[in-house]
Image (spheres, helix red, strand yellow):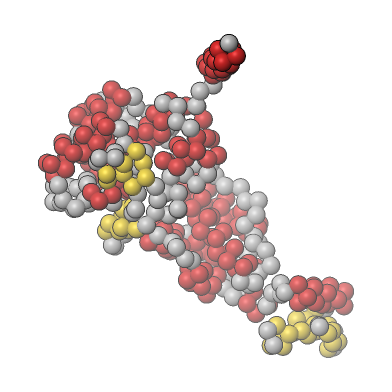
Amino acid sequence: MATIEKRGASYNVRYRVEGKSRRKAFTRHQDALTFKAQVETEQATGRGIDPVSARTTFKAFYPLHVKSRVNVKQVTLTTSKTLYDNHVNRWDDWPLERITQAAVQDWIASMVLEARVSASTIRACYKEFSAAMKTAVAGRYIRETPCVGINLPTVDRDPMVVLDHAEIHQLAEAINPRFKALVLFLAYSGFRIGEASALRWSDVDLLKGTATVHNTVTEVVGKGLVLERPKTRAAHRTVPLPQHVTEALKEHQSRFGGQWVFTTSNGTQVNPRTFNRRAFATALTKAKLSCRVHDLRHTAISLWIRQGVDLPRIKAWAGHTDAAFTLNTYAKFFPTDDTGIMDMLNKNIANALEQSKNQEN
C-alpha cells in the first residue's frame, strides 16, 4: 500500500520497495494520486520500479549489463567494449530514467550528421546500447526501453558474387599452393573462413567425405587468434564434400600435414583477416576475378540449390538457424520455372497409372 501525506505545499507519496521506505513529492494532489495508483498496481503485479535504481547513471549500470551476458564470444565482448569506449559512453552521465526515445533518436541523428561514423558502426552502437536498455528493463531499473521506433541509417551491402566451376578452379590455381585446397574447400563446403581456419584433421572424414564444424577462429584485439565454439547450435554441423574436394584434401594433407587442416608456412592457423588481405587478394588479381572470401560460401550454397538440394538440408549444411533467412538470402537461385516440375509430375502420374493397368491385367 502507498499513502499520501500533505507537507506544506507538497504531497508526499510514501511506499515501500523490497522492505525499504521510499518517498516522492508532488506539487499537485492529482499527480500524487496518479503515482500512488501506479505504485500500487506495480506492487500488485510484481512489476515495481525502484526510483533510486531508476536514477542510476548509465556509467554505473553498464558494467552490470556486461556481467549479465552469458555465452558471448570473446570477439563480441571486445567489439562491445570498443563501441562503448568510442561512442556509447556518451550516455555515461545520464540517469537511466531520463533517457528518452527522443534523446536516443537525436544521438543517432548526430552521428549520421558527423559523417565520421559509418552506417554499420552506428547500427552496431545502437544495438549495443539497446541491449543495455533491455537489461535495465529486465532488472526493473526502468519501466520500458527508450529504444523503440528509432530510425537507423541504411547500410550499403556489397553485392553477392557467385563463381562458376571454371572460376573456382581458376582462383584455386592462382593462389599460393598452400591455400589451393582451402579455396576449393570453401567454395564447395559452404564453411565460413573462421570455421575452416579452426578445422582439425580429426574433424574431417576423408572416407565418408564429410567435414564437421566444432570451433571457429576469430581475431581479438590484444589477444590474437582465439578458438571458440560456434555462436549457435545450427552452426555446429556436418557437411558432405564432393570427391573432387576430398581428393584435394588428401593431396594437401600429404604435402602439409600438421594438426590443423589449413595452416600458414609457419604451421600456425590461418588468420582470416591476413588471408583475405594477402594471399586471397593476390590470387584475385592474378586470376582477374573480383569477389570476397565470404562469396565462396555464397557460391557453395548457390551450387547446392542448383543441384536441387531441398531447403531443410541447405539450411542445415549452411548452419542457418532459420530456413526463412536461407530462402530470403538465396531466393534468386531457387527455380522459378514451374514447367519442368509439372512435366515431371505428369510423367510420374502417367507411370503410376500405367503400372496400375498392368497389375489389373
Left or right of 267? Residue 83 is: right
Residue 154 visible to an observer of this rendering: yes
Does 33 sit above or below residue 305? Answer: below
Residue 210, by quadrant, is top left
Instruction: Residue 274: give x, y in percent of width and height.
Output: 25, 46
Instruction: Identify the residue at horizontal 24%, vertical 36% (top origin).
Output: 246
Residue 156, percent across and down? 48, 38
Which residue is painted at 51% across and 73% down in the image? 64
Q: Which residue is pictured at 69% across the width and 74% down the height?
A: 49
**Residue at 31% across, 44% down:** 211
Relative placement, left or right, of 352 versus 33 is left
| Residue 224 drawn at (x, y percent) | 27, 58
Q: Is residue 339 above or below residue 206?
A: above
Q: In the picture shown, does residue 9 fall above or below 94? A: below
Q: Residue furthest left?
A: 255
Q: How many marks?
A: 0
In the foreground, 361 or 338:
361
The image quarter in which residue 294 lies: top left
Q: Position of residue 324 (x, y in %)?
A: 55, 39
Question: Which quadrant does the C terminus fall into?
Answer: top right
Instruction: Name which quarter of the figure residue 204 lies in.
Output: top left
